[in-house]
Image: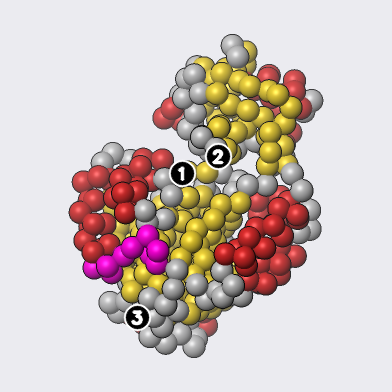
Amino acid sequence: MRQFFGKSQSGDLQEAVRGLNNPQLIMLLSNDEQFEKHVAQLEKLFPKVPSIGCIGMSYDTEVVEKGVAVTAFTDGVSASANVLEEVSTMPVKYIERLKQDINEVNGSSRDTVCIDFCSGNDACVLTTIYSVLGPLNIPLVGGTGDAGKISANGKIYQDAVAYAIVKNNGGRVKTYKENIYHQMGDYYFIASKTDKANYIIGELNGRSAKQVYQDILHVTEKEILTQTFKNPFGKINGDDTCIISIKEVTGNALTCFRQVNDSDVLIMLELGDFRKIVKDTIQMIKNDFPKRSAVFSVNCLFRYLLFNDNNYMQEYLQEMSALGNHVGLVGYGEHYNNRFVNQSMTCVVFE
């Protein structure tokens, strides 16, 4: 298979698709002002080609912050695209679409991946989708776009998730998740007075969540929202750690980007040697896949901001280009199989 990436920093879709021929799947990454126009244009240019889209920054060896980018798979790919609606209330109502699409591409765990773009309510979405993918061992990579809108096959949706089932007819696929944080000290917290609907942590070990965070890290209230780049919370999930980023201070509580429940056990995380961790990830992928057709990744917005603050973003994209054709999305939350994670990188590698 082959991966095409075209971009326009000015938002000119015609420029972005120049040179694209016979796509089997198209992924549109646009900006808020032009998204609906771009979705309609793309459908006219490539009618009946499966497509998904969202609002967000994209990248290959440089970042497209406000323009438009098109990623497409060609040559040796079978794909279908669709949408699950009503994700805030009942996405399972549309689950037959997903089952039919997997059957249509004759997907298997060895050569098939699901890529999704979500408008929100990620945890519920992933639980629903993985009820089908899990028993088939088909992996998933994706993320959340901006402005609560996504597209599928030329139509705009809100409160929905767009997904593509992609089968690599020429080899394997495998997904990866990169975590650049590790546990700090021996802090363990029991969460209480949580608001699941609004992702709020009221107390940790019976004390104000805001005060606990400030006391440990010696930061002011204003500094909390930037300190979370270096010190998010973590929730241990088996042999994995789910990163929980702080979104805002709400009184004496902390509002996060991920749901926390009463009695959840949290830990404090700290930033590791991200340059070394990135090099290790690249080497692991090279070891697993001596020959690679393409890599599609989702990097968290907070990673993008952190890397920019450390003058590393451009270097990071250059390093990842050692894998070959590497492109992706800057997301507002990352998806990895049935997990909704923060401040991470997830990717799918095609042999």
> Which amino acid, mark 2?
Asp
Front residue (pair 150, 240): 240
Report which residue position mark 1 lands on: 339
Rendered image quadrant of residue 268:
top right
Looking at the rendered image, the disc whose residue lies closer to the viewer, 2 or 1, is 2
Q: Which residues are magenta?
A: 104-112
The spot of residue 50 in percent (x, y) is 32, 72
Looking at the rendered image, the disc whose residue lies closer to the viewer, 1 or 3, is 1
Q: Residues within 10 Å of mark 3 (few under 14, many from 20)?
A: some
Q: Is residue 207 shown left or right of residue 74?
A: right
Rendered image quadrant of residue 112:
bottom left
Question: Does residue 282 sit above or below 255 in this rendering?
Answer: below
Report which residue position mark 3 lands on: 46
The spot of residue 32 in percent (x, y) is 48, 60
Looking at the rendered image, the disc whose residue lies closer to the viewer, 2 or 3, is 2
Report which residue position mark 2 lands on: 240
Question: Does residue 28 sit above or below 135 in this rendering?
Answer: below
Q: Is residue 23 shown left or right of residue 298?
A: left
Question: Does residue 335 sit above or below 290 in this rendering?
Answer: above
Residue that appears at 41% across and 45% down: 338
Residue 91 seen in the figure: yes
Residue 111 included in the magenta stretch of the image: yes
Give yes or no for contact between labels 2 and 1 (Cβ–Cβ under 8 Å).
yes
Residue that appears at 42% across and 55% down: 140
